[in-house]
Image (tube, coloured by chain):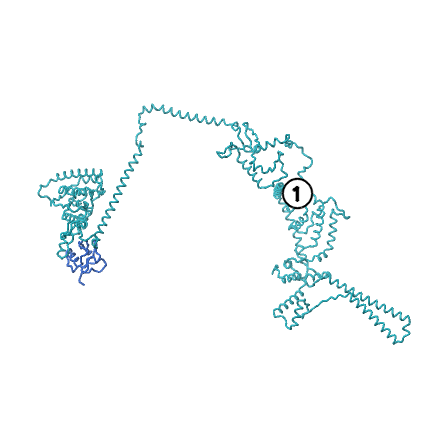
Chain colours: A cyan, B blue
Amino acid sequence: MSSSDRPPPSNLAILFATCLIVGVSSFFLGQATALGVFSGGRVPIQKAKKSKSEDEESDSEAELDQIFDEREELREFPGNSEECKLVLVVRTDLGMTKGKIAAQASHATLACYKTFLRLAPDSPLLKRWERYGQAKVALQVKSEEELEVLHAQAVSLGLCAQVIHDAGRTQIASGSATVLGVGPAPKSIVDKVTATMADVVSIEEANKIRVAMGMKPLPVPGLPSTNDNGPVFKEAKNGDSEDEPASTYITRQAAASDNWQQLQAEAEAKAKRQAQKEAIKKAREAAQRFAKLEGKGLGDVDEGEDMDTRTWLLQQKKRQKKIEKARKLQEALEEQERAAQAEYTAADLAGVKVGHELSQFDEEAGEQILTLKDAAVDASGSEDELENADLRAKEKLVEKLRLKKRKPVYDPNEVDETGEKGLLSHYDEEIEGKKVKRFTLDGQGRGVEEVTPRQQAGSQNSKGISVSLDILKEDIPISDYKDESEIKIRKPKKKKSKFTRKKDFDEDDIFPVVQEEKLDPSAMEVDSVVENSSNGLAKKRNLDAAFIDDDELQANLAAQRREALKKRKKVHPEDLARQLREEASAIPDVMNTTEAADEEPGLVIDETTEFVANLQRRNSPDPRARRSRSAKLEKSQNGKAKGLSPIADEDGDVDMEQSYGAVEDEQDRQERLVRSVSADVPATGLQEEETLDQGLGSTLSLLSKRGLLQTTAGGDINAQFRERQRFLAEKQRREEEAERRARIQREKDRLSGRLDRMSAREREEYARWNNTQRDQMSSRQEAEIFNREYKPNVELKYVDEFGRSMNQKEAFKHLSHQFHGKGSGKQKTEKRLKKIDEEKKRLAASALDNSEATASTATAKKNRQAGVRLQ
Amino acid sequence: MIIVHVNDRLGTKAAIPCLASDPIKLFKAQVAARIGRQPHEIMLKRQGQRPFKDHLTLDDYEVSNGVQLDLELDTGE
């Protein structure tokens, strides 16, 4: 629909006009945008900013082949108060660059605007569009046909539609349609066009069909419904439905889509606003930043240096002077400081306290470095005090050691130097604080001892002048005599015997010791080390020296330990070798003796079996037997001891110089000696087997040891026996007496001739009478004696069927069983039989078997005692 | 008003403006007017579903704006 009523303008004229218009309008638009006139800010950014080069390129080459639609009837949409927008439909199938697209879109916008201005300059749509930020929406189509269809559709709806045809100088073919601009027009109406795009047939067309089919026609968008005569406002509000809003599914559907679109748009707008805000903020911050960075930058030229060479040279001298001055000032300061340091001498230290004793700074201590004592800054009354860290530490150590000792309060050995001692002086430290030893320097390298008030008082009280006698100590002539203090006098030991005995059983000694000590007459008197020191036996004795004080004892012990260590270190290898040799020679001796014993013919009893058999608690050995056996030995020993002992002479005189303890010791020793010999346990620790060839006594003892012979109250039996013997002897004597008297009587009768006068028969009668008389008398006498003296020894003995005597209990049981006519049960009988068997076995045990042990085991077993069982 | 797209995936594609309350029979008539085929030769269905029946409406099949329906040839069987 190109204009035909006007003469076509020449190409040059058109170009000129277009360029002019584009230039001016874009300038004004740009200005307005920059000034923020269009507050809506709905300008798509890609539209607002065009790349410079592209713009220029496009401007220079774009030859607009605009088709000015000369239609007069641009619809005004009077009932529509919607927001207006301009739609730019861009063809993307041409492969235009972004810049090109932007330029073409600008062209389209401008074309639309101009057309609108020309055709309907007073249109409220245009004003509305301008007022709401000239909203532009860019869409895309894939082909020219679609573009054409859209164009036609838009035109058919009475919208302003402009297609831009490119001159085709740069990228694309000449005359090809690039962009379609639709609008500005109300949103909903533009959407009708663009939403359906090319596929949508015009609704009128569809309506025609529908009407032909007898159906309700579709509502035409943007137009009041043709066949609906309802109220207008409803139509205006909801252009596409006559129903109540959201009353039907369809309306809901439509509303949903609308809502969705609205939401989308809102979100978009929000995002855009946000971006804008951020941009503004950024710009503001940048401005602030730059405001802060005022002054000269590195690149800026300094004003001060902005002078010519001459002035610089003139000022040079001044500058040098200034530098020199500063240097001098510094030097002066340094010198002053140095001078102040150099002057620091001993005089400066006058009056400074030193927190140690003066005596601690002697030659041997050497030079000490003193430092200022740590003290709180606000400590009132405390002056500066010098101290040495090492010395302080040492003092503390000493103090700690002193406290550790926990000495009793009363120390008789303590000697107060001042001679003055207060009441409960040991609390002085707690009450008055520690006595601090300190002195003050006087500036000439000397110390003035500080005296505490206590000391002062002490010095006032003391009479006379105390003169130290230590000076004389130096030149004491060397005495010929041994110093008393060096001699150690040992306290006589009371427990000597015990001590020595312990030593006797030392493992190293092989033979029961009759030591040299016994032979040494002065052993008790002086502490002389008899043994070789490397043996280590005698060392302990040295420790028993008499000490009064704990401290002294400690010190002495320490010294002795040190000495012992030294000695041990001094042991020479040859000594050691000798010792070993001696030991080696001693051991074979024992071996020889045992071998000799083993070589004897006959049954050999192993030592081990004996040892094992003897592994038991010794049950009260019979000391009497052993005593008797060793009686002879004892005697000889006694004699020997007497001979050896110088203490008790043959005539029994006792050396009075010796103490009672010593005498007792001597006696003890002899006794012990005897005991040691009597209990002569051989090296194996086993007793020798007893034999029966030594007489009845030994046999008896053997039997008694084995428990075969029971000795029950031996003394009683002996007394009874003796009584009985005496009684019998008496009786015999009486009988003899009676006989003798009868014989004398008969002799007398014979001599008197009395018998001669009698006949034989009478004689016989007489003799018989005499005899009866005598018998009667004697019997009467005996009865008398018997009645007087007889004590019946009642012993009830019961013998069971095996011939063994039963004790009381057994006998009772036996009798009871006999009386009741029934015996004990099977178990009891078995038990008894077993017991009897065991007894028999024991009696028949081998003489060589150490039955003493077995007997004791039996008793142990009977008493249910635990014992060592080796099997 | 809804726009329903009809596509036979062989090159025939049409966007048909209609109402959701339209019966399938009438919708077929509209499609027929657009694509140049007799209404009884047209079979409409959702992809992978059974064909639409004539006496029901688009709404019954829950066809809404922008829905695409498959267009097939109905052989009358």
Badge 1 is on which residue? A546
B36 lies above or below A87: below
Furthest toward the front, the residue is A231
Count numbered badges in the picture: 1
Q: Position of residue A11 (x, y in %)?
A: 12, 40
Image side of residue A755 versus residue A47, left or right: right
Q: Which residue occupies the foreground of this view, A91 or A793?
A: A793
Query: What chain does mark 1 sit on?
Result: A
A453 lies above or below A186: above
Q: Which residue occupies the foreground of this view, A340 or A477?
A: A340
Q: Secondary structure at mark 1?
A: loop
Q: Position of residue A813 (x, y in %)?
A: 65, 69
Which amino acid type corresponds to the residue marked 1 in the rendered image? Ala
Q: Is residue A353 visible?
A: yes
Q: Which residue occupies the foreground of this view, B21 or A655?
A: B21
Image side of residue A44 versus residue A14, left or right: right
On the rendered image, what quadrant is the C terminus of chain B found in? Answer: bottom left
Q: Position of residue A627 (x, y in %)?
A: 71, 56
Give me the residue at 22% from left, 51% from top: A257
Q: Could you say which quadrant of the image residue A559 lies in? A: top right
Q: Position of residue A242 (x, y in %)?
A: 17, 53
